[in-house]
Amino acid sequence: MTDGGTTVDTLKPEVAAAVDRLADELEALSHKIHDNPELCFKEERAHAWLTEFLEKHGARVERGVGGLPTAFRATVEGAGPGPTIAIMAEYDALPGIGHACGHNVIATAGTGAGAALAVALGPLPFAGRVQVVGTPAEEGGAGKVRLMEAGVFKGVDAAMMIHGRCGTQVWRPTLGIVKVKAEFHGKATHASSWPWRGVNALNAVIQLFVGLDQLRQQLRPDARVHGIIVKGGEQPNIIPEYTRADFYLRALSKDYCQELLRRFTGCAEGAAAATGCRVDVTAEPTIHDPMKPNRTMAALFEQNLGAIGFPVDPDDGEAGYGSTDCGNVSQALPTIHPYIRISPDGVPGHSREFAEWARSPMARAGLVAGAKALALTALDLLASPEKLAAAKDEFAR
C-alpha cells in the first residue's frame, strides 16, 4: 500500500490499460524489428528504436551500458530508495532465418512493460525502481553474461523476461551449454594422382560425427550433442589438410556438461588417431548455465496472466529444452523466464514457420499479454516486500 492508501490491486488495471493504449505502437515496433533482423552485437537499429520508444514514454535511458554499444538500461524510478526489478529484453536475430526465435516479441514485451509503468504510474508510488535492460547477443554472444561481468546487474534484486513459444508455460527447464570446436590438421596433396601421400582431415571430421552418433546411446536423456562442419576442405581435387566442426554440448546440469566435453574430446582424439591427423579441441570459456527455478515469482506471473485472462497451457512434453544466457542471470539472483504463446501448437522455434508466426496477430496477443504480466509482476515485487523476500529466500535455498 502506498502512503496515500492506494493498493497495488487498484493500480494494476491502470497499468494494463496503458499497455492496451500502447499496443498499436508496440506491434508496429515489433514488426519493424522483425523486418530488419540484426545479428548478435550488431543490433544497432533495434537498439535505437527501443531506446527512443522508452525515452518517448518517460523512462530515463542509458545507452551502451556494460561496454556493449547495443545494450541499454531504461529506468522508471519509484518513491525513494528501494529494490530494483529488472525486465530483460532481447532483440538479436538468427543468421539466415531472421527472427525465428521471436526476439522481436521479447524486446517489445519487455519494453512495453517498462513504458506502461512509466505512462500509467511514473514515478512509481512504491520505493525502488523498475529497469528495462536491453541485452544484446543472446544468440551466440552470451550478452547477459558480459553485462553481468560489467556490473550491469549489480544491485538488481530480481529479474524477468518472457519468451515466445508454441504454448504458455510459466516454467520450463533450460539446458546448460558448452560451445566447442574441433580442428583437424592433415596433409594436402592431389586427390587423384597422389592421394596416398595425403592425410585427410575431412575423413577425421566425418569420423568424429560417426563416433558421436554412436556415443548418443550412452548419454542421459536430457543431453544434446549437435554440430556442423564449418570447414570441409577447399575443392574436390585436394586432400583436405584442415577441417573444423563446431558443436553445442547441452545438459540439465553444469557437471554433466563437463562430462559431455570430456567424452566429446575422447571422440575427437579417437577420430584423429584413426585417420592420422592432429586435433585441437577448444571450448569457449563462457558456459551457459541451466535456469534455476523461482516458483515464487513464477506463481506471481501466472496469477497476473490469470487476472488479464490469458490462459496457461499444459506442457505437451513433446519438445525438448533449449539454452539461454538468462540461465546465468538465474544463478546469480531470483529470475524467471516464462514462455508466452505466439504460435499454434507444435511450431518449432528456430524454424522459418516460427519466424512467420512471430509477426502475426497471435504474436501481438502474446506481446500484449507478456508486457502486462511482466509489468504487473514487477509491481507486485515492489509493492510487497514480503513477496520479494520470499523470492529471495527460495533463491537462497
Image (cartoon, rainbow, N blue to C red):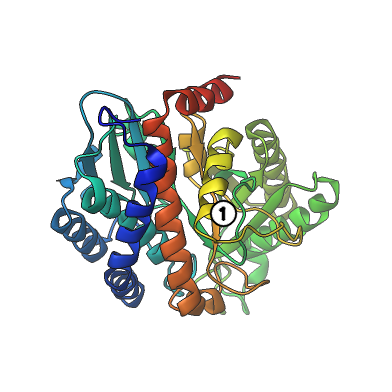
Q: Is residue 75 visible?
A: yes
Q: Residue furthest right?
A: 217
Q: Tell how many labels.
A: 1
x, y (%) of residue 75? 22, 41
Tell me: residue 55, above or below residue 83: below
Question: Which three-letter amino acid code belongs to the residue tagged 1?
Answer: Gly
Compared to residue 82, the image places residue 198 above or below, namely below
In percent of the image, x 65 and y 38: which residue is there? 257
Instruction: State whether residue 91 appears in this view.
Output: no
Q: Compared with residue 30, is residue 388 higher up or lower down, i.e. above or below?
A: above
193 left or right of 132 in image = right
What residue is shown at x 20% (from left), y 44% (from top)? 122
Residue 167, horizontal then vertical, whole percent? 62, 63
Instruction: State the residue in front, 139 or 115.
Output: 115
Look at the numbered disc 1 and give the secondary structure of its residue: helix
User: Can you tell which quarter of the image residue 318 is in?
Assistant: bottom right
Question: Splitting the image into 4 quarters, where does residue 84 fall?
Answer: top left
Residue 52 % position (x, y): 16, 59
Q: Which residue is mark 1?
A: 306
In the image, 271 versus 318, the foreground residue is 318
Residue at the front extreme of this rendering: 5
Quick check: 267 left or right of 290? right
Q: Nearer the viewer, residue 166 or 375?
A: 375
370 left or right of 340 in image: left
Toward which corner of the image does residue 131 lie, by quadrant? top left
Residue 137: image location, x then y, percent? 37, 53
Residue at 23 percent of width and 49 percent of height:
118
Circle 1 crowding by C-alpha within 10 Å: few under 14, some 14–19, many from 20: few
**In which quadrant will I find the C terminus?**
top right
Classify 288 as above or below 397.
Answer: below
Q: Quadrant of the N terminus?
A: top left
**Residue drawn at 58 percent across, 63 percent down:** 228
